[in-house]
Amino acid sequence: MSERHYMRRRDFIAALGGALVLAPQISRAQSAKPIVGFINNGSAAAFTSLAAAFQKGLEETGYVDGQNVMIEHRWAEGDNNRLPAFVQEFIQRRAAVIAATGGTASPIAAQSAAATIPVVFAIGADPVKFGLVASLNKPGGNMTGVSFLANSLLAKQVEVLHELVRKDAVIGFLVNPANPNAEPDTRAVVAAAALLHHRIVTERATTQAEIERAFGALTAQNINALLIFPDALFTSFREQLVTLASRHKLPTVYNYAFAASGGLVGYGAKQTEAYRNTGIYVGRILRGDKPADLPVMQTSSVELVVNLKTAKAFGIEIPQTLLARADEIIE
């Protein structure tokens, strides 16, 4: 073997050895990107724009998915029973932060992770009421987030329905009993309706299949209007709900997102900004901020959207007083 050939062989072996040494280092570097676990008790299709808003907020703090952070989404598809398994998975994988979104059930499930992993929530309920934080200004633990108006607007939604129907109308209320807000919110709806001399008929659904059954039960009781409880299950299957309401020409009030899908009236918080701020808080925690030092953000803006095309199909005349208050009118 010539000296030149020996040198080439030796250089090759040295290079190969160096590559083998570097390989696990490169692998570790790639896996060293912090994991952000994004859990939501709705569906990916229904929350696409909100997930994008979350990612935008994260990018504003300097974290780009796939570059210096890994966002991993888990969708419960309306089944809250799947949430604890998602949380345990992220605990085992030592996620840097968990973003608990979609509804109150998500951060409640994520509380088991809060002893070791920071949790940032986006919910439409009072986080103090459910023991997620000690107070809004001083969360005091490993959880913080954004609270927007959703459940607290139900009484106002009853008032909107009151403007659309006759004064003795029977109002149906579709609620998901698996939602932690279900019982107190049902009481609030019944009380608000009583003040306006309306009777409330309540039906419950915890799955997509039960939505059809509950709707049939409501129409069998001769309801004149319908209110949909703000819940990730119903948001995930909003097309189904809008179709059912259209089939029976039932004046229905939903959260704001339903009107664009053909719902008669949408009234509620536009959650885009809330999810963006959730992403910003996650980014701040990744940079070293403590959840206990980040006050719970509260957003109070709401949107009223009226779909005149649907009103015409139903044969309903929308009062001018309601149209004058609308933030958007779909024609």
Image: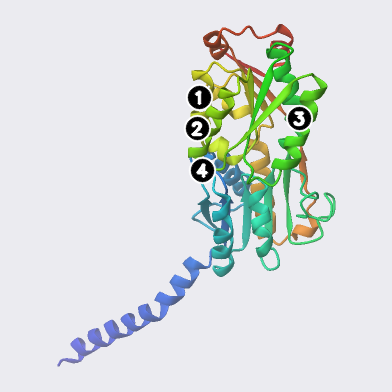
Query: Of the residues under marks 4 and 1, which one precedes in the sequence?
Result: 4
Disc 2 residue type (three-letter): Glu
Crowd tier of the residue under label 3, counting other residues whose Cα lies within 10 Å: few below 14, some 14–19, many 20 or above: some
Look at mark 3 in the image and give the residue it sits on. Answer: 190
Instruction: Give residue 202's position: percent from left, percent from top.
Output: 66, 32
Please tell me whether mark 1 or mark 2 is closer to you in this view. 2
State the CA–CA distance, disc 2 to disc 4: 18 Å
Crowd tier of the residue under label 1, counting other residues whose Cα lies within 10 Å: few below 14, some 14–19, many 20 or above: some
280, 141: nearer the viewer: 141
User: Mark 3: which secondary structure?
Assistant: helix
- Quick one: quadrant of the C terminus? top right
The disc at residue 43 is: 4
Look at mark 2 in the image and give the residue it sits on. Answer: 212
Instruction: Give residue 91's position: percent from left, percent from top.
Output: 59, 66
Disc 4 residue type (three-letter): Ser
Query: Of the residues under marks 1 and 2, which one precedes in the sequence?
Result: 2
Residue ID at (50%, 24%): 244
Residue 329 in which image quadrant = top right
Please tell me whether mark 3 or mark 1 is closer to you in this view. 3
Residue ID at (20%, 87%): 4
Look at mark 1 in the image and give the residue it sits on. Answer: 244
